């Protein structure tokens, strides 16, 4: 079940990256590259930070197949996929919850201190989207609006705190994932964004 949910999350991340590439008028190769980058970039950054070689995404063929295949499908049927944007966003929230809690637990298991594990977990969830936006020459979405990184960090803190207090890891991971998904979906529903600084005079 966990593997199936992870693959669903990868597909959702890949679809968001591929749709962004289609909107930017990239060719089929570019669309697939953006799909792979968005889906697997966060996990690759995690493995580099934790000195895990080779990165998991490069030796787990279902991850590559699902991400690349989703990118190709979006390229071929992007008008239909665009109409399912809400469903993709919900699945994206599921993937975010799973990736963040999994990344945090991986960092803790490898001996990272709690604060570092939280940052690694958050990066696992948001890294792929940030790389996508950089490749498209945009300011990463997580840095300018939407409750995304904040939700990811909240879930990572729950996992690290539960580990510090000696709670069983499985219920803690489920709790962290549910909090992330709930915050993300609630923010989408209510149109919440993180606060920004007031505009400076003359700017």
Image: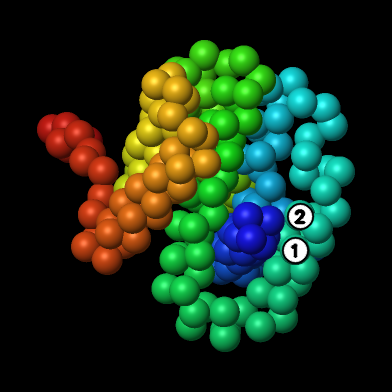
Q: Which residue is drawn at 26% across and 43% down?
A: 194
Determine whether 10 is above or below 15 in the image.
Answer: above
- Residue 52 in picture, x, y percent from top left: 77, 26
Occupied quadrant, residue 149 = top left
Closer-to-camera residue (54/202): 54
Picture quadrant where residue 189 is located: bottom left
Q: Which colour scheme is used?
A: rainbow
Q: In this view, does 128 lie to the left or right of 122?
A: right
In this rendering, the answer to whether 84 lies above or below 118 is: below
Percent across and percent down for residue 81 are 57, 79
Within 10 Å of the Cα at label 2, are there few (<14), some (14-19), or many (20+) other Cα atoms?
A: many
Label 1 secondary element: helix
Residue matched to label 2: 63
Which circle marks residue 134 in the picture?
none
Identify which residue is drawn at 40% across, 21% down.
165
Q: Do the residues labelled 1 and 2 touch (CB within 8 Å)?
A: yes
Whole-angstrom CA distance, mark 1 to mark 2, is 5 Å
Residue 148 in sight from this viewpoint: no
How many numbered tags mark residues here?
Answer: 2
What residue do we see at 83% from left, 48% from top? 60
Residue at image point 66% right, 20% down: 110
Picture quarter with the C terminus: top left
Q: Where is residue 171 in the image (x, y as percent from the top left)?
A: 46, 43
Residue count near mark 1 (Cα–Cα under 10 Å), binned few <14, some 14–19, many ≥20: many
Q: Locate the N terminus and report the quarter of the image it occupies.
A: bottom right
Q: What element carries label 2?
A: helix
| Residue where numbered disc 1 is placed | 66
Residue 96's place in the image compared with 89, above or below, is above
């Amino acid at each position: 079940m966990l593997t199936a949910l992870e693959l669903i999350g990868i597909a959702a991340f890949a679809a968001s990256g591929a749709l962004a590439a289609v909107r930017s008028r990239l060719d089929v190769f570019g669309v697939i590259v953006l799909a792979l980058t968005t889906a697997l970039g966060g996990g690759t950054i995690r493995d580099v930070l934790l000195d895990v070689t080779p990165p998991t995404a490069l030796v787990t063929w279902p991850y590559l197949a699902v991400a690349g295949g989703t990118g190709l499908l979006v390229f071929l049927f992007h008008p239909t996929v665009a109409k399912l944007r809400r469903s993709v966003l919900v699945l994206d929230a599921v993937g975010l919850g799973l990736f963040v809690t999994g990344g945090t637990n991986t960092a803790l298991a490898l001996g990272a201190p709690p604060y570092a594990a939280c940052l690694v977990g958050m990066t696992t969830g948001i890294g792929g989207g940030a790389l996508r936006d950089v490749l498209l020459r945009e300011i990463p979405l997580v840095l300018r609006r939407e409750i995304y990184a904040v939700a990811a960090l909240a879930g990572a803190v729950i996992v690290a705190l539960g580990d510090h207090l000696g709670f069983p890891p499985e219920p803690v991971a489920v709790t962290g994932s549910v909090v992330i998904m709930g915050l993300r979906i609630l923010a989408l529903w209510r149109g919440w964004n993180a606060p920004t600084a007031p505009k400076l005079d003359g700017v």
